[in-house]
Amino acid sequence: MRSLTYFVAVSLDGFIAAEGGRFDMFSMEGDHIDALFAEWPETLPAPALAAAGIAPGCARFDTVLMGWDTFAVGLAHGLQNPYPHLRQVVCSRTRGEAEAGNAVELCRDPTARVRSLKAEPGEPGIWLCGGGRLASALSSEIDALVLKVSPVTLGAGIPLFAEPSALRWTLEGSRSFRSGVVFQHYRRA
Ligand SMILES: NC(=O)c1ccc[n+]([C@@H]2O[C@H](COP(=O)([O-])OP(=O)(O)OC[C@H]3O[C@@H](n4cnc5c(N)ncnc54)[C@H](OP(=O)(O)O)[C@@H]3O)[C@@H](O)[C@H]2O)c1
């Protein structure tokens, strides 16, 4: 069974973006970014890969799930097809195909879609990109959590999970970078 991994940058106090959706406090430079390009290239948007001259692999993930507001961050910058190397599933109950464009699949029922994706054959997993509201809706389906924890506190913003969701996790590994970022890998206990 393929698994669903919530792979996300987060502050020390558990926010994935500052108030208003800003995320420039998560440094895009440093040795943790080198590790992303080398080991998680499919989680980088196409323009970043192209600028670095890197071809995306899909070793870890072949599909990405985004909530509408996460997808809209790219849309605001003219990016309708952020991860063309992945199957892109965008969740919304209110938006239509015309707004979403034809590079992505629009999904009304994320839980049912994740279950059907998990049942597909093959190795690569499914990346839950975010945001916090979609993560809440899918919390019962999340098998693994990879937190890119940045050494910053925000005090307020968009939380890792928008709704209270008490889940227990087993730490499988962690890796510290000179940049101060720590990658923490958890599996659902
Ligand atoms: N730090 C990181 O790595 C990272 C990663 C991803 C996102 N982010 C940040 O997170 C922010 C967005 O997060 P967010 O929590 O505000 O929003 P979100 O989860 O990205 O999107 C929320 C929207 O997704 C749709 N949705 C959610 N649950 C659904 C369900 N059960 N069924 C169908 N559609 C559903 C709804 O769209 P409709 O209202 O249209 O129905 C909802 O309004 C952005 O600022 C982004 O930058 C950060």
Image (cartoon, grey):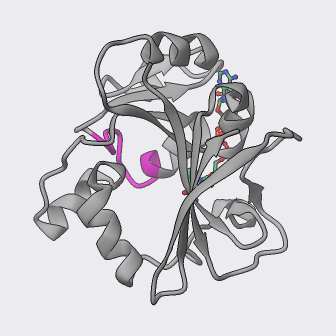
* Quadrant location of the C terminus in the rendered image: top right
Left or right side of 147 for 57: left
Left or right side of 140 for 109: left
Q: Is residue 63 visible?
A: no
- The residue depicted at 71 percent of the width and 67 percent of the height is 18
Magenta region's main secondary structure? loop
- The residue depicted at 78 percent of the width and 70 percent of the height is 13
Q: Quadrant of ligand 1?
A: top right
Q: Does 54 appear above or below 27? A: above
Which residues lie in the magenta part? 74-83
Q: Does 18 appear above or below 74? A: below
Q: State which quadrant residue 155 falls in.
A: bottom right
Q: State which quadrant residue 37 falls in.
A: bottom left
Horizontal and vertical percent position of residue 39? 29, 59
Left or right side of 87 for 71: right
Q: Does 29 appear above or below 85? A: below
Horizontal and vertical percent position of residue 20? 71, 61
Q: Does 108 appear above or below 45? A: above
- 135 or 107, which lies in front? 135
* Quadrant location of the N terminus in the rendered image: top left
Horizontal and vertical percent position of residue 144? 57, 41
